[in-house]
Image (cartoon, rainbow, N blue to C red):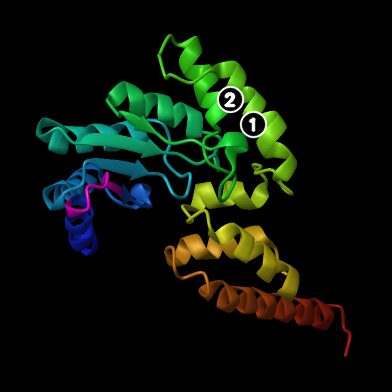
């Protein structure tokens, strides 16, 4: 959060709304997130988001982090937001729990358009909150039409919970790694989900996507060694 201090100050001078994103929130404890949120608010942030960049938070994980941030910055009048991903199909559920914990801003994207298995779908959020009697100011019929008739025709590939994106959520991998992993998988003939599993094990974060090539090469070499071992076991020289 300390790298954002200057930016919040300048943005406030310009009269802009200032919002901070605590990325990859699953990697930090609720107390640590609250500590980072405090830095942002003291620097001028008017809202701080708990961001599940990897779609790795599971229900109470999201709620506890939002609650901790609210307890820290709420008394100062700063809002708390939540940004979910669908890698484990929990973006909507986590968003509801975040709201119940006190979050005032909830992110979504029509047709779940976003990295990994996609962001929490705005149209599903709207329908869910309406069923719960929560007023959002969103016209459900209009948002459903916008998703189906306007956005969807422009999306060549709908976000989906396939093996690779589910692995991202399970392994806690930043969602933007998915397409990079798929390209490397095609180039080096290794599984994308295996690449992403390694990314999670190594703890890479956003901005380190170039390391995927090293992982793909590592997996390719391992695959070749196994193939040679199989040939040797079969007596092939």
Query: What residue lies at 61% left-to-right and 65% top-to-bottom?
Result: 180
Query: What residue lies at 21% left-to-right and 38% top-to-bottom?
Result: 69
| In this picture, residue 140 sits left or right of residue 5 | right
Residue identifier under label 2:
143
Image: magenta residue range: 13-20
Q: Nearer the viewer, residue 69 or 42?
A: 42
Name the residue at the bottom extreme. Answer: 237
Question: Where does residue 98 sit, x and y in percent of width and height?
Answer: 35, 29
Q: Nearer the viewer, residue 227 or 181?
A: 181
Question: Where does residue 192 sit, x and y in percent of width and height?
Answer: 66, 61
Name the residue at the right extreme. Answer: 236
Magenta highlight on residue 138: no
Q: Residues within 10 Å of mark 2 (few under 14, many from 20)?
A: some
Query: What residue lies at 43% left-to-right and 36% top-to-bottom?
Result: 107
Q: Is residue 206 visible?
A: yes
Residue identifier under label 1:
147
Label ID, residue 49: none
């Amino acid at each position: 959060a300390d790298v954002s201090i200057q930016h919040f100050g300048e943005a406030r001078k310009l009269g802009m709304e200032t919002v901070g994103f605590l990325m990859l929130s699953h990697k930090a404890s609720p107390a640590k997130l609250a500590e980072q949120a405090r830095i942002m608010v003291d620097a001028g942030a008017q809202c701080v988001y708990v961001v599940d960049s990897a779609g790795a938070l599971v229900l109470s994980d999201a709620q506890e982090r939002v609650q901790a941030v609210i307890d820290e910055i709420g008394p100062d009048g700063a809002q708390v937001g939540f940004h979910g991903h669908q890698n484990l199909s929990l973006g909507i559920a986590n968003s509801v729990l975040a709201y119940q914990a006190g979050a005032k801003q909830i992110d979504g994207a029509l047709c779940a358009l976003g990295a990994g298995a996609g962001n929490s779908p705005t149209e599903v959020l709207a329908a869910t909150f309406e069923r719960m009697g929560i007023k959002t100011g969103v016209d459900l019929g209009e948002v459903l039409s916008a998703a189906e008739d306007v956005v969807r025709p422009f999306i060549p590939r709908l976000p989906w919970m396939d093996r690779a994106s589910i692995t991202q959520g399970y392994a806690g991998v930043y969602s933007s790694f998915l397409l990079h992993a798929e390209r490397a998988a095609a180039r080096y003939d290794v599984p994308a989900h295996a690449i992403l599993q390694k990314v999670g094990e190594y703890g890479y974060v956003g901005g380190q996507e170039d390391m995927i090539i090293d992982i793909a090469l590592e997996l390719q070499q391992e695959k070749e060694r196994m193939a040679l071992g199989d040939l040797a076991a079969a007596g092939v020289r």
